[in-house]
Amino acid sequence: MNVSVVIRTKNEERWIDRCLRALSLQVGCSFEVVVVDNQSTDRTLELLKNHACRLETIADADFTHGRSINQGIRSRPSDFVAILSGHCVPLSERWLERLLAPFSDPTVAGVYGRQEPLPDSSPFDKRDLWTTFGLDRRVQVNDWFFHNANSMIRRSVWDQLPFDEEIDGVEDRDWAKRVQERGYRIVYEPRAAVFHHHGIHQGRDEKRAQRVARVIELIQKNKSERRAGEA
C-alpha cells in the first residue's frame, strides 16, 4: 500500500517546520511527502531543505486550490493521498494511520479529520472550529462537507474524478458531492486531528465568505448549469 502526503504551501515559514516535524513522528504506515509550493517569498523553501520531501512548484498565474492538489497527486503513484495545509500540524503520531483506517470499506472515497484551534487563535476561529468539527465520527452519504486542510482520498477514485481546477476554492466540497453521486461515502474521523491556527473561515473575512458562498451556490447546481454559468 503506497501513501503520499501532499502539502500545499504559500509563505508558511511560521508553520511548515512544525508540520513536517509532526509528520516525521508518524507511526503505523510508511509514506512519502510532496510539497506543492505557490511561489513562497519567505523562508518556506529554505526550511523544506531540513526535511525529506519532494518539492513541486506552481505559479500564481496557474494557481487554484484544485490544480495545486492535482499536481501533487499526479506526480506520485500512490494508493491513498493525505492532503494537508502547510499551516496545519498533526496532534498525534497516529494521525495518518487514523485517516487511513476507514478505507478498509471499499465504498469510502474520502476521509477528513478534526481541526483544533490553538490558544492564540482568534475567538471567531475557535468558535468556528469547535462548532464545525465535533467529537462524533460520522459516515456521510448525502452531506458533502469535506475539508482539504486535513483529509485523505482514495487515489483510484481521484483518477476518475480529480479536483475541479477552475472553481475558486471549495474544491473539496465539490469533489465530495461528485463522488457521493457515484455512490461513494465520505467519513469524518475526529481522532485524526490537526491544529489549525486561523480556522476554516479566517475570522470575519467578508470577501472570503462571499467567494465561498458564490462557489457553493455553483456546486449546488448540476454540472451543466454550473459550466454554463462559468462560460
Image (tube, rainbow, N blue to C red):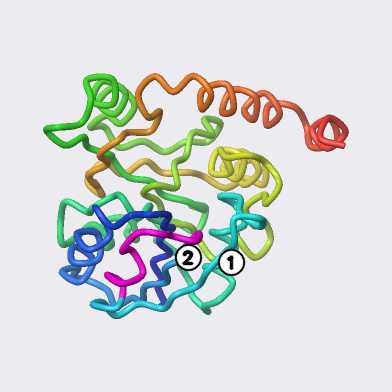
Residue visible at 28% across and 39% down? 115
Where residue 98 appears, as percent x and y from the top left, is 26, 56
Q: Specify whether residue 209 is painted magenta.
A: no
Residue topped by disc 1: 71
Residue visible at 66% across and 55% down? 61
Separation of residues labelled 1 and 2 (CA atoms): 8 Å
206 or 213, nearer to the observer = 206
The quarter holding residue 131 reads top left
| Type of the residue with mark 2 | Val
Where residue 167 appears, as percent x and y from the top left, is 67, 41
Q: Nearer the viewer, mark 1 or mark 2?
A: 2
44 or 25, nearer to the observer = 44
Which segment did they paint magenta? 38-48
In the rendered image of this protein, does residue 97 appear above or below residue 129? below
Left or right of residue 22, residue 2 in this image: right
Q: Are marks 1 and 2 in contact (CB under 8 Å)?
A: yes
Under tag 2, what secondary structure? strand
Q: Earlier in the sequence, mark 1 or mark 2?
A: 2
Left or right of residue 87, residue 160 in this image: right
117 or 100, nearer to the observer = 117
Left or right of residue 11, residue 179 in this image: right
Q: Residues within 10 Å of mark 2 (few under 14, many from 20)?
A: many
Where residue 4 appears, as percent x and y from the top left, is 41, 71
Under tag 1, what secondary structure? helix
Q: Specify whether residue 45 is painted magenta.
A: yes
Residue topped by disc 2: 36
